[in-house]
Amino acid sequence: QIDAGSFRYQVFAGFGFTPLNSISESWTAGTEYALMTIPVLNGSDLFEIVNDTWTGDIANNGDYYISLNGSDQTGMIYSISTGVEMGDPDLEAFHVQPNPASDRVVVNYLADPDVEQVVEVVDATGRSILRQVVARANGEARMELDLRTVQAGAYHVVLRGGQRVITRKLVVQ
């Protein structure tokens, strides 16, 4: 990751650290090529592929960067707006309230007695700020997270269990 101005860039190094324009590959103008796939889970809309003055500098690998800030800027090529899959009971049951929050938040979720589940509050860099193992239960359940030690900012609340990872945005004031 590289911070430049108000943006954070992630270098695409799928070809190593060799600039893409030095690869002996035939690229046809006006044709789209998939250089990578970014898995965006459950409504996280924090990614943009951008072409701005910073990415346009050949020293920065010539326009092949991804902005992690998710705000619209001049030169944007693609903006990914993800939706929530409807009809999935796990997704429909997972709520974080109130939002924005200041001192505490209530997390509603669908508990599974056969799977260990963990709830985490994660910052923009992916660092876990709070982590709590969920009591095993069956059906709809709720837990409270104490946010008094969490600095103001934007976070994700992540529910992990088995093969499932579900996220919700959270703003702490």
Image (cartoon, rainbow, N blue to C red):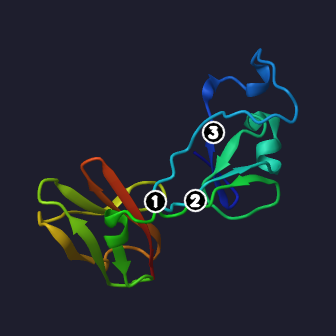
Q: Is residue 94 visible?
A: no
Query: Judging from the image, what secondary structure is the residue with disc 2 in?
Result: loop
Residue 15 lies in what quarter of the image? top right
Q: Amino acid at mark 2?
A: Leu
Q: Position of residue 13 (x, y in %)?
A: 61, 31
Q: Residue furthest right?
A: 29
Q: Which mark is residue 164?
A: none
Quadrant in which residue 28 is drawn: top right
- Residue 151, position in %: x, y? 41, 74
Q: Give the camera-side residue of 124 and 88.
A: 88
Residue at the (20%, 74%) spot, across then down:
141
Outermost residue to the front: 87
First in sequence, mark 3 or 1: give its number.
3
- Identity, as a three-letter code, of the amino acid under mark 3: Val
Q: Is residue 133 left or right of residue 12?
A: left
In which quadrant is the N terminus drawn? top right
Q: Secondary structure at mark 3?
A: strand
Query: Residue 42 bears which disc, if any?
Result: 1
Disc number lying in front (3 or 1)? 1
Of marks 2 and 3, the one in the foreground: 2
Between residues 38 and 149, which one lies in front from this camera angle?
38
Count neighbours of disc 2 (C-alpha within 10 A) and say few if under 14, some if 14 to 19, many if 20 or more: some
Q: Amino acid at mark 1?
A: Asn
Identify residue for label 2.
Answer: 46
Marks 1 and 2 sit apart, C-alpha to C-alpha, by 12 Å
Q: CA distance from mark 3 to mark 1?
A: 24 Å
Residue at screen point 58% across, 40% down: 37
Nearest the camera: 71 or 90?
Answer: 90
Residue, x 77% and y 34% (percent of image)?
A: 59
Numbered label attached to residue 11: 3
